[in-house]
Image (spheres, grey):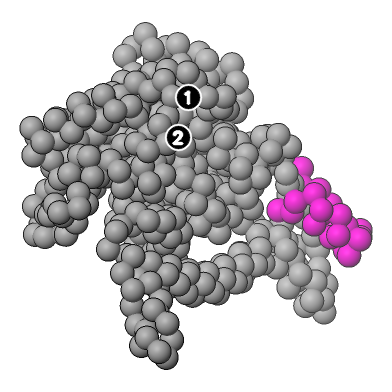
Amino acid sequence: MKFSKHVKSGGGVDFQLEGPELTRAVVVHVERKTRIESKAADRDAASKLAEAIGLAEAIDLDIVDTLIAPLAASKPATFIGSGKVAEIAGRVAAADAELVLVNAQLSPVQQRNLETEWKAKVLDRTGLILEIFGRRATTKEGMLQVELAHLQYQKSRLVRSWTHLERQRGGFGFLGGPGESQLETDRRLIQERISKIEGELETVVKTRDLHRKGRERIPYPIVALVGYTNAGKSTLFNKLTSANVLAKDLLFATLDPTMRNIVLPSGRKIILSDTVGFISELPTALIASFRATLEEVLTADIILHVRDVNHAETEAQANDVNIVLEELGINEDRRGQIIEVWNKADLLVPSDFAAREAQAQRHENCVLISSINGQGIDKLLATIETRLARKSALFDITIDPSDGKGMAWLHQRGEVMARKAYDDGRTRLTVRLDADTAGQAQAKFGKGMRTKS
């Protein structure tokens, strides 16, 4: 990706993509001097800048300069102060950069004004994450969700963001007045595309619901992986399933959800679901667009919150994940379903490892692991089994040979673990049932059902 820039006589700047060369970019993190009230944990400015650089590297940009811009109060026209705007303009020119990434949310007017001042393309945090998601999406659903979020973002950028959009189109004077402006046309076309995508996504959601109902008929518990981006979710997913999901030391290395069946040591089958990684200040539009994908988390029996315990800000990252889970509807009532998986233990120095291991042992909902060398994986699987066992039990149910409907009912609503045929034609099934289904089975099979010891 490379931008060529052409300065207009009126001071505006046109940008045009050309060639496969890496785009030279400057990364600017804007650090407010006065903290805004937020549920998010505070991070230091250097770590925020490092994360912004990581986001930029995720789309293969050539980072030629970075800086932190202190901000006492945001300016309506340029967000940051005029002195800092001028300083950055000089650094952009000196580095011959084509792109400036601003790690903050910019209004359309602010973005346009900064592009004019810096003579370079400007992307804010939302635009950058959208670019990353656009590259990572591989399934039809993922691409539709990204395009929807991108169009909603782009629609807001049409508010006098580009002067060439003010030209008049169409119109025959005496027949229809001056005609429709290019700005109005683009806004209308974007809205039409948004409506079309929303319709296509509704179809995808209906299909997903059908698949979910199909899984409910084969009642394997669902275990969903969530976590901050780059915490090692996909590496853990591959370790547990022997799958080949892309796993790199890269922010948002995987985007589309993946599901696989695995067998626990007891022989019990579960469905493991990998999901998109979270990040601090995840744009609201993206949360809304990916809500259908993240519904797998809402319906999961167990949620594995994967954390990078080697990261200096693991607590702040965990807090950011919890904020997104709350926005999705995972409230305090469902906190008991979450197991914290403290990953990357292999990177800890011995003293930190000992401290983390002791800390994890004091909490039944924490497991220290390494998804690279497999350390702690056995304990994680045992913890999953223990948690699932609280929600279900094994029963022996004897069925007469004429009760075909009863046999089908158990296969549909329970997990049949074993069967034994008797000489008189009866069959004894060992079935795992959750509490609600067990009550229904007791009413249906009566004395033919007993709890397995």
Provide residue 419's location: percent of width, then percent of height.
68, 62
The type of residue carrying mark 2 is: Ser
Residue 446 left/right relative to 415: right
Quadrant in which the C terminus appears: top right
Q: How far apart are labels 1 and 2 at the CA level?
A: 9 Å
- Tag 1's secondary structure? helix
Q: Which residues are magenta?
A: 432-453
Q: Nearer the viewer, residue 260 or 156?
A: 156
Which labelled disc corresponds to residue 316?
Answer: 1
Residue 220: x %, y % from top left: 61, 56
Compared to 309, does 354 lie above or below?
Answer: above
The part of the image, by quadrant, that contains residue 24 is top left
Q: Position of residue 10 (x, y in %)?
A: 20, 53
> Would you name the residue on which mark 2 appears?
280
Judging from the image, what secondary structure is the residue with disc 2 in?
loop
In the displayed structure, does residue 118 sit left or right of residue 232? Answer: left
What label sits on residue 10 in the rendered view? none
Q: Residue furthest bottom?
A: 175
Q: Residue at x 51, y 47 (%)?
A: 284
Is 229 in front, or is 201?
A: 201
Of labels 1 and 2, earlier in sequence is 2
The answer to whether the residue labelled 1 contacts the one labelled 2, judged by CB atoms less than 8 Å apart, is: yes
